[in-house]
């Protein structure tokens, strides 16, 4: 279990006239940096660091200390890392978590300690609903929302029978539940595979026998690369269309999928061809810095750093005043690469969802091409279950 500290800034000390102004804002960045899904953590960290750089390397005018650690996609490891960061490193914010099972393992002890969780990816349904908490904010998405958007699209476009596949862990169940909530048609099959499974030959044979009109799947990281390549190798790519949330076919996996992904469809809150000024700058800066096209993971992480900067500026940089920081986050204004963005009362986003198709870009690389708006101002389905306690 290794941790690494990054000093992101070292100046701007004198502006506040209080002792805290000279102390860094401490952020624990727990994510998956190893194994078949290890690229997801690096994508999030690269986006977050680029967001920090875009606001001058400080948050609300204060220096920043980011303490990075690898959860190995294991909830018990994530819990150990969170305990250490809270008790020994005294971090004030935990972010970076990419898997919902890890988030569910660390959220309660972190929140009980008084620290904030600002999720830039994981969006388990529990913390959007009955477990919502004054110090828990998710600026990326709630797991059900993009599947709900794709369910709406397929229903409105006459698709009758869909086969569902996802890993057997909390986010996999959220994603398929979200799709079923809005699709309303026939479910030809619903299969949950082992988390981390890389061979899908048996499941693809079952899928072929079911003869669905379409397949909706959620497999992030290496699971998705193997599934899409094996699906194409089985000869199904041109027979039964693939649909998923962006995380199943984005730039964290498209280079590994290659032509096997071309022609697939995804629902997304952002794609690399977004045309607003903030998105164009982010995409250009990311490709210049890292030599690859960014994914929605990186876009959300970039937004996360810029959102923290805006909230801390609004609260005078005083993260130690937790009530003021919470209120600043709840009403935060910043230029999101996603365009339309605001927090709902349960501290989860209200934003627009789009349909995109995987095509080849001008350089022959597989990429998302935005096609149409599916739903404007989309909120998650759990907000009504949340009774948010007042700031304290």
Image: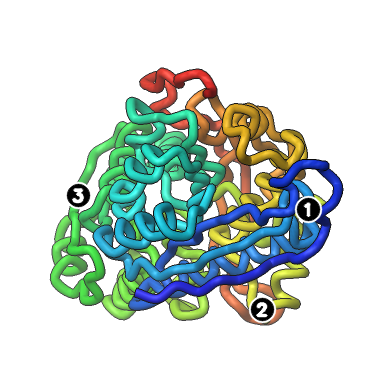
- The percent coordinates of residue 183 (x first, y second) are 35, 36
Tell me, for residue 190, which label it has, or none.
Answer: 3
- N-terminal of the two: label 1 or label 2? 1
Q: Tell me what residue is drawn at x 58 percent, y 33 percent.
A: 322
Q: Position of residue 108 (x, y in %)?
A: 33, 41
Residue nearest the viewer, comparing 343 with 268: 343
Looking at the rendered image, the quarter that the N terminus falls into is bottom left
The spot of residue 118 in percent (x, y) is 52, 45
Q: Which mark is residue 290?
A: 2
Local packing at callout 3 (Cα closer than 10 Å; few below 14, some 14-19, many 20+) is some
Q: CA distance from mark 1 to mark 3?
A: 39 Å
Q: Residue at x 38, y 35 (%)?
A: 127
Q: Is residue 167 left or right of residue 355?
A: left
Query: Which color scheme is applied?
Result: rainbow
Please determine whether, in this image, residue 216 is positioned above or below residue 3: above
Cα distance between the residues tagged 3 and 2: 38 Å
If you read the primary sequence from the N terminus, does the residue marked by circle 3 or circle 2 appear first? 3
Asked which quadrant contains residue 321, the reply is top right
Q: Which mark, by number, is residue 225?
A: none
């Amino acid at each position: 279990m290794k941790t690494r500290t990054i000093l992101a800034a070292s100046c701007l000390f004198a502006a506040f006239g209080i002792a805290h102004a000279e102390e860094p804002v401490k952020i624990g960045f727990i994510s998956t940096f190893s194994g078949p899904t290890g690229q997801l953590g690096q994508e999030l960290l690269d986006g977050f660091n680029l967001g920090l750089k875009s606001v001058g390397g400080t948050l609300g005018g204060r220096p920043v200390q980011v303490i990075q650690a690898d959860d190995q996609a294991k909830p018990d490891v994530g819990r150990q890392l969170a305990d250490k960061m809270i008790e020994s490193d005294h971090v004030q914010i935990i972010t970076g978590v990419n898997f919902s099972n890890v988030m569910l393992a660390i959220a309660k002890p972190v929140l009980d300690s008084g620290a904030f969780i600002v999720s830039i990816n994981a969006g388990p349904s529990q913390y959007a609903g009955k477990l919502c908490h004054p110090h828990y904010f998710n600026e990326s998405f709630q797991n059900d929302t993009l599947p709900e958007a794709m369910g709406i699209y397929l229903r409105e476009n006459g698709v009758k029978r869909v086969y569902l596949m996802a890993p057997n862990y909390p986010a996999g169940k959220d994603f398929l539940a979200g799709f079923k909530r809005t699709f309303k048609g026939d479910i030809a099959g619903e299969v949950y595979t082992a988390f981390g499974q890389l061979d899908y030959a048996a499941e693809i044979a079952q899928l072929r026998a079911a003869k669905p009109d379409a397949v909706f799947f959620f497999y992030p990281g290496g699971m998705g690369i193997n599934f899409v390549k094996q699906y194409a190798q089985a000869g199904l790519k041109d027979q039964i269309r693939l649909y998923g949330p962006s995380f199943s076919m984005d730039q964290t996996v498209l280079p590994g999928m290659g032509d096997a992904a071309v022609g697939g469809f995804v629902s997304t809150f952002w794609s690399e061809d977004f045309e607003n000024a903030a998105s164009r700058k982010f995409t250009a800066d990311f490709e210049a810095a890292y030599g690859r096209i960014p994914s929605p993971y990186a876009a959300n992480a970039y937004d996360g750093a810029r959102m923290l900067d805006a909230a801390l500026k609004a609260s005078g940089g005083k993260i130690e005043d937790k009530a003021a920081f919470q209120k600043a986050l709840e009403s935060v204004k910043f230029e999101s690469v996603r365009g339309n963005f605001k927090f709902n009362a349960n501290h989860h986003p209200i934003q627009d969802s789009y349909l995109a198709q995987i095509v080849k870009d001008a350089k022959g690389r597989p990429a998302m091409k935005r096609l149409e708006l599916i739903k404007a101002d989309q909120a998650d389905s759990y907000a009504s279950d949340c009774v948010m306690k007042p700031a304290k």
